[in-house]
Amino acid sequence: MRRVTVMTAVVAGAVIGLAGPAQAAGLDPQTRRNTLTAMEGEAYAHASYLAYAQEAERTGQDGIATLFRETAETERYDHFAAEADLIDFVHSNADNLRESIAGEEHEATVVYPSYAEQARLDDCPEAADLFTELAGDEATHAARFRVALQAVLNPGSGIIVPVGEVVPPVPIVRSTPACSGRTEDNLKTTLRGEAFANAKYTLYAEHARATGQRRLARLWDNTAGQELGEHFAQTAILAGLVGGDADNLRTAIAGEEHEATTMYPSFSRQAATADDDRAAALFAEIAHDEADHASAFLRALVDLSLGGSGGEEAKKSGRQPTSPKA
């Protein structure tokens, strides 16, 4: 399978010293920017496909639900993870906390308050309330991360890393956009931001766990869970992210085809031109993976149109869940 080839290349690069800070620092700046763009897309696909799976389960289309869930696993635990490794995205626990504090504070004090004000101007009180709630939550996250940073920097000080709380996920239901104008755009931007935060924080949790910081890992996991299970979910409902099963499949097909035929090929060519050979190979491999995803979704759509359930598509595509939880 291509996915195994990609991950084998990543591991091999690490063994011979290509995947560490020196290689990441030596990447062409445009290659790094393209990788971050790709990671944002993979994180969004992961979150969206999990939402689409919920709708398929509600309509009794268990085969389509399985297809979406397994594809979501590949996007996050294969593609996103490999791209993160390529650019040495995860740093020390302290640096990961510093980066996250800055991001959460920016969202809490700038981004979401401005989105709430725009929602009021656009006469969309539901969005104004949501953005206000998100701003408060992100401020809480930043405060916890600041305490955790002090604990990490001062071992033996008696400062205890907070672990946050497990927030029950909000079911994502089929809906239509609740707002228009700039607020509709802001909701879409929020979806991508929250999906990326979820994927990023799960990586940080894995690193914390590997370095023996179990309470910090719990903090990252719980924060990641809220970003996806509550923030992304609430925003998805207002944004009208989830439609019927056929519409969701069509949306997924369009996204996968774009990545397979346009985005990843262009990223691969750019990386090759910059002599970033490992990046070029990774992007090319993922382009083929995305083509496989588009084909599987198309077969499921055809089967659904014929009155079937698309239940055999995950098996036909040959994918297996790659999550550490699987």
Image (cartoon, rainbow, N blue to C red):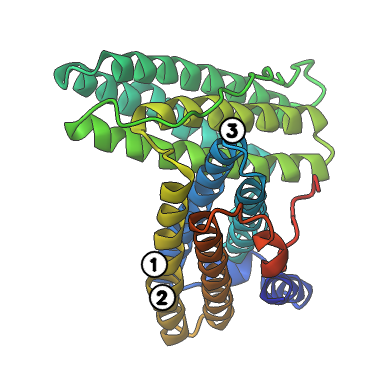
Callout 3: SS: helix
Residue 29 seen in this snapshot: no
What residue is disc 3 on? 58
What residue does disc 1 label? 258
197 shown above or below 76: above
Q: Where is residue 180 in the image (x, y as percent from the top left)?
A: 20, 31
Q: Is residue 217 visible?
A: yes
Q: Is residue 153 left or right of residue 262?
A: right
Label 1: how many residues lie within 10 Å, few (<14), some (14-19) or many (20+)?
some
Numbered label attached to residue 261: 2
Q: Is residue 111 left or right of residue 102?
A: left
User: Between residues 198 and 155, which one lies in front from this camera angle?
Assistant: 198
Query: Does the residue at mark 1 contact the one at mark 2 (Cβ under 8 Å)?
Result: yes
Where residue 98 appears, as percent x and y from the top left, is 55, 35
Q: How far apart are marks 2 and 3 (CA)?
A: 32 Å
Q: What residue type is labelled 1?
A: His
| Helix, strand or loop for disc 2 | helix
